[in-house]
Amino acid sequence: MTTTVAAPATAGPVAKAKVRRGWTQHGLLFVGPFLLIYLAFLVWPTILGFQMSLSSVNIAGGNNHFIGFDNYAEAFADPRMWRSLWNTLVFTVLSTIPLVLLGLVLALLVHNVRFVQWLWRLSFFGPFLLPSAVIAILWLQMIYPPDYGLLNGTLGTDILWLGDPSTAMWSIVLTTVWWTVGFNFLLYLAALQSIPTHLYEAADIDGASGWDKLRSITLPLLRRTTVLIVVLQLVASLKVFDQIYLMTGGGPQDATRPIIEYAYDVGFTGYRIGYASAVSYILFVLIVIVSLAQLRLFRKREEVAS
């Protein structure tokens, strides 16, 4: 007669706990280097920047002391800060809409073209690989000059595209769309290629037209990609600096000066780092609010659609 000894009831959970603890240790080992870099180069500078915004830091010297929210109060009462913030919002609206729509249209065209697709992809995505300095020189020296520029030569006009306050912002937007639309185009193209082909085959059997397939299959399945692109584009447009600084320097008459350039000017030209930090944190809060609002809006739309 043999006797069977039952294993302790706690053996299973203990073993699982050991396995889980082992995975946690390995996970921390892999995440640790990135976490240290993240804390050192993002979290700590963010805390330090906010601390500076509450002080009278001046890189030209002088007494550095805690002043509370005086920098923020001064920023909210500064008309030039509001003008630069308005310019940033105008640029964001004017650039985001065509960048999203044009990226979608170009992706649809390339996805349905069956010959030399690599050439179209390279043509649309190529400008995005160029640095901002190259883009600025190209448009300043070849496209926008009033006397020999390609744009005035084509239209038969003599408009000061970057020298007139009424056209300067539109010119910056046109340059930005040409330069960066390739990124959105690539994201949309990748999403289109991931849509199962059997959905279109079933729609063809049912006699659906091209518009019906676009409206009922393509656009709904691209909703998540559109949410991602809109949020990324809004954040990128709110942080615009390079092309404006290189092409107009914020002019003419502050017509194109974004809020980041204003913070740069008061911080490194006016030497008021504390005040510049306060302006930067106002923009930071605005970006967070806009991003969360967009995500919440699209989430509600998905809930209604489902």
Image (cartoon, rainbow, N blue to C red):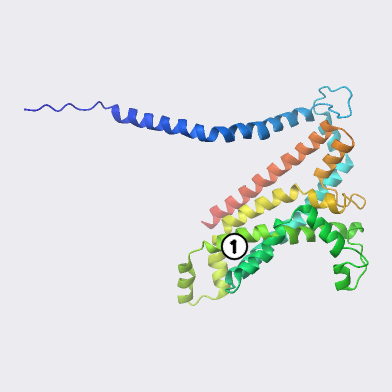
Mark 1 lies on a secondary structure that is helix
Q: In percent of the image, x 29 and y 28: which residue is there?
A: 11
Query: Is residue 77 among the parts visible in the rendering?
Result: no
Q: Nearer the viewer, residue 182 or 212?
A: 182
Instruction: Determine the residue positioned at 47% across, 68% down.
Output: 199
- In the displayed orientation, state which residue is furthest to the bottom: 207
Residue 247 vs 25, above or below: the answer is below
The location of residue 272, given as percent across then percent down, is 86, 32
The quadrant holding residue 174 is bottom right
Q: Give the side of residue 60 with respect to residue 292, left or right.
A: right
Q: For the image shown, how many numbered marks are present on the structure?
A: 1
The residue drawn where x is 85% and y is 64% is 142
Compared to residue 74, the image places residue 167 above or below, namely: below
Q: Nearer the viewer, residue 243 or 103?
A: 243
Q: Quadrant of the N terminus?
A: top left
Q: Amino acid at mark 1?
A: Leu
User: Can the viewer see residue 52?
Assistant: yes
Which residue lies most toward the left here?
1
Provide residue 240's location: percent of width, then percent of height. 77, 49
Q: Quadrant of residue 136?
A: bottom right
Q: Position of residue 30 (x, y in %)?
A: 51, 35
Dot 1 surroundings within 10 Å: few (below 14), some, or many (20 or more)?
many
**In this rendering, would 80 be left or right of 198?**
right
194 sits to left or right of 179: left
Residue 144 at x, y = what percent? 87, 63
Residue topped by disc 1: 189
